[in-house]
Amino acid sequence: MTASHSPAFELSGLRHRYGARTVLNIPRLSIPRGETLGVIGPSGAGKSTLLRLLQGLERPSEGTIEMDGARMPHPLPLPVARRITTVFQRPLMLDRTVRDNVLFGLRVRGRSDRGPAGPLLERLGLAHLATAPARRLSGGEAQRVALARAMAIEPDVLLLDEPAANLDPANVARVEAFIRDAQGRGTTIVLVTHNTHEARRLSHRTLLLIEGCVVETGPTAAFFETPAEASTRAFLAGELVY
Amino acid sequence: MWLTFQVTGLALVIATAVGVPVGAVVGLTHFPGRRLVTLLLYTGMGLPPVVVGLVVYMMLSRSGPLGSLDWLFTPPAMIVAQTVIAFPLVAALTMSAVEGVDPDLRLQVRALGATRWQTGWTVLREARIGLTAAIVAAFGGIISEVGAVMLVGGNVEGQTRVLTTAIVLSTRQGDFALAMALGIVLLLLALGANAVLLQLQGRAR
């Protein structure tokens, strides 16, 4: 895994609230371009909220997010928004074929060809379902189609929310190989996962969020082998930290 | 029969062309007064046709604000009345249909790079079963309607007599056989039009 060090994202004084409840509080965070940041933490820690803010789907209550040195306005200008995509934890399929779902991102960009749909579905073990109605897929199949749908547009920034949850080991391997391909192309990735093993395998750096706050962040090897914070050690040991 | 088809068809096209975008905007966006607009649309679904006919009559009568159009007792007046009846049905049912699409789908579509228009269009496409139901409901509401077209059309033979008003006239004259025959034609027309709409819905899937 390689990564350059100029920041893709700089978060400063970021706070996000739903009503009176603060769900995210990140005083400062830098995500270098081409890096994969693994974000781990218990449910309700603010991991998915962080992705929604980076995707520009919500405006932060306070603070700023800069992308490539420029402050991200809300709503995002289309050229900026189109450099980022998210694979959601609960991917929803459009009521059309699997192939048309994969090509959706290209269609909205005005491309009418079949593009990379075939090879993408082939690699994810879904080629035989290309013309099947996407709404009839199982959860695991839909998850892989959502990944193919995101990869088809070759984004600069890929936000992944539990991309391998509910997959069997063979398909986890397929999805992780896919993510490694994106890393090889220099894609900046933020990987939200409950699976610490997955974060360890795929991330350059890892960040632990608990109750919206960054407990610890650092290079993945050091984070897992010599965590500085007691809460991190407890979380990695599987203890209840919230 | 041809006049019935023309009047109802044109009213349905106009009500759909205006009602679907209005319903989509109300269903997909938040703006001040949205609840009031929703209330008005739902109320409009239950408008008594004869009251619509009366209001359109007054608007188009010589002393009314649109009297200069000289549309009273002509097919355009009937189209206006039927459009007013159909519009809230199309708009309110479109609103319900787009509200029934998972809001997360809109976020996911936007995250794939869709513009606001593309997102709206995609949601409408996802809601197409509900949209078809809206159009079918509006069609059913106006093809069987008699009060408004009788008032503003005048039931003039060869000019503004449609199937429903012809049935009323035949019944009043005691010609039940003709009234029944016209009723069957009306039913067949409704059956055929709904079959076409359902076919279109199936093709869109």
Image (cartoon, rainbow, N blue to C red):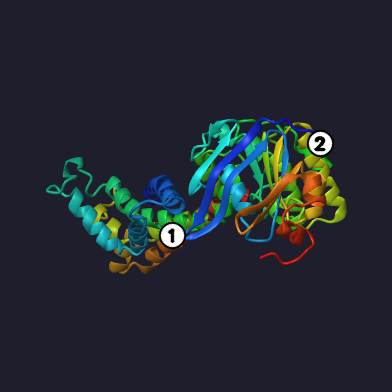
Instruction: Say what amino acid the circle numbered 2 marks.
Output: Met
Q: How many marks?
A: 2
* Vertical placement of residue B37 versus A102, above or below: below
A61 vs A113, left or right, is left
Asked if the residues shown at circle 2 and circle 1 are in contact, with their CB atoms under 8 angstroms apart, the answer is no
In the picture as drawn, the residue positioned furthest to the right comes out as: A170
For residue B184, say whether it is visible: yes
Image coordinates of residue B15 in percent, x first then y, are: 39, 49
A240 vs B131, left or right, is right
Residue that label 1 marks: B140
Q: Nearer the viewer, residue B67 or A217?
A: A217
Residue A1 marker: 2
User: Same chain for marks 2 and 1?
Assistant: no
Image coordinates of residue B17 in percent, x first then y, are: 42, 44
B22 vs A6, left or right, is left
B106 vs A234, left or right, is left
Q: Residue at x 23, y 50 (%)?
A: B73
* Vertical placement of residue B145 versus A57, above or below: below
For residue A92, say whether it is visible: no
Pointer 1: residues within 10 angstroms few (<14), some, or many (20+)?
A: some
In the picture as drawn, the residue positioned furthest to the left comes out as: B63
Pointer 2: residues within 10 angstroms few (<14), some, or many (20+)?
A: few
* Vertical placement of residue B16 versus A18, above or below: above
Instruction: Kindly indicate the quadrant of the structure image that contains residue A237.
Output: bottom right
Chain letter of the residue beneath label 2 in the structure image: A
Rounded to the nearest angstrom, the CA distance separating label 2 from label 1 is: 64 Å
Image coordinates of residue B95 in percent, x first then y, are: 45, 55
Q: For the residue labelled by badge 2, is the local secondary structure a helix, a strand or a loop?
A: loop
Q: Residue at x 66, y 39 (%)?
A: A31
